[in-house]
Image: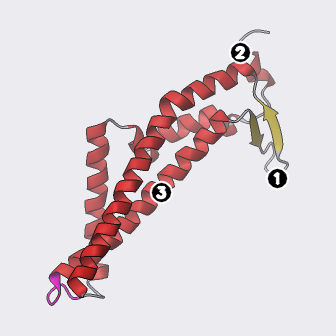
């Protein structure tokens, strides 16, 4: 059996194979942020934070008047911004974690015809080894980066809530 015979013998549709799901996510415009180098990743993080802040500012000003309570209005807006940002990065985390679990798994669940006829394909050892290597060298650093980002966002939310309580009481 030659190396490429598994492509012919693999019953899983191409778009449902874990390797191609990983490639699709990596090449995605939004999900590809996580794979950028450190400076571009940080730049995108703060750019999205600033854009969410500017979009949510009019909505939070309906509830707290910035002319009467400027510091509270900014802190509430920052709180809402951090919540939205944590939802976005939580989605990134869940998506990359799912891709990683599919790469590491020895069995692949797939839909052949779309009629919910869930089937299982057991990966050959060569493919399993290749995908586990890909997981450990490509996805583990991305998931670790997302974990640190989510921890940073949670600390930011806690800090903003503490400041809000200090200003209110």
Percent coordinates x, y for residue 43 in the rendering = 26, 47
Residue in the foreground of this view, choosing between 11 and 123: 123
Residue in the foreground of this view, choosing between 58 and 134: 134
- Mark sitting earlier along the chain (2/1): 2
How many numbered marks does the figure carry?
A: 3
Task: State the SS at label 3.
Answer: helix
Q: Considering the image in quadrants, where does the N terminus appear?
A: top right
Task: State the SS at label 2.
Answer: loop
User: Residue placed at 21% from the left, 88% from the top?
Assistant: 65
The residue that mark 1 highlights is: 116
Q: In the image, is residue 102 above or below residue 151?
A: above
Occupied quadrant, residue 156: bottom left
- Mark sitting earlier along the chain (1/3): 3
User: Residue placed at 31% from the left, 57% from the top?
Assistant: 48
Q: Of tags 2 and 3, which is closer to the observer?
A: 3
**What is the chief secondary structure element of the magenta stretch?**
loop
Percent coordinates x, y for residue 147 in the rendering = 44, 49
Percent coordinates x, y for residue 113 in the rendering = 81, 45
Residue in the foreground of this view, choosing between 63 and 16: 63
The residue that mark 2 highlights is: 4
The circle drawn on residue 90 is 3
Quick check: can you spot residue 55?
A: no
Does 66 lie within the magenta span?
Answer: yes
Query: Mark 2, residues whose alpha carbon is within 10 Å: few (<14), some, or many (≥20)?
Result: few
Q: Is residue 1 left or right of residue 105?
A: right
In whole angstroms, how far apart are the C-alphas of marks 2 and 1? Answer: 29 Å
- Mark sitting earlier along the chain (2/3): 2
Range of magenta residues: 65-70
Does 154 lie within the magenta span?
Answer: no
Residue contact at pointers 2 and 3, CB within 8 angstroms: no
Q: In the image, is residue 168 above or below residue 129?
A: below
């Amino acid at each position: 059996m030659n190396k490429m015979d598994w492509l012919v013998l693999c019953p899983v549709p191409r778009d449902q194979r874990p390797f191609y799901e990983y490639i699709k996510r990596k090449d995605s415009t939004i999900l590809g942020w996580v794979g950028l180098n450190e400076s571009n990743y940080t730049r995108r993080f703060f750019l999205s934070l600033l854009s969410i802040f500017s979009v949510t500012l009019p909505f939070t000003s309906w509830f707290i008047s910035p002319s009467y309570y400027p510091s509270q209005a900014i802190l509430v807006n920052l709180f809402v911004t951090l919540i939205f940002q944590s939802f976005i990065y939580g989605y990134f985390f869940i998506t990359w974690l799912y891709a990683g679990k599919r790469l590491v798994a020895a069995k692949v669940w797939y839909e052949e015809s779309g009629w919910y006829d869930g089937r299982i394909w057991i990966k050959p050892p060569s493919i399993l080894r290749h995908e586990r290597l890909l997981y450990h060298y490509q996805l583990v650093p991305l998931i670790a980066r997302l974990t640190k980002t989510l921890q940073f966002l949670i600390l930011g939310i806690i800090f903003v809530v503490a400041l809000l309580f200090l200003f209110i009481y």
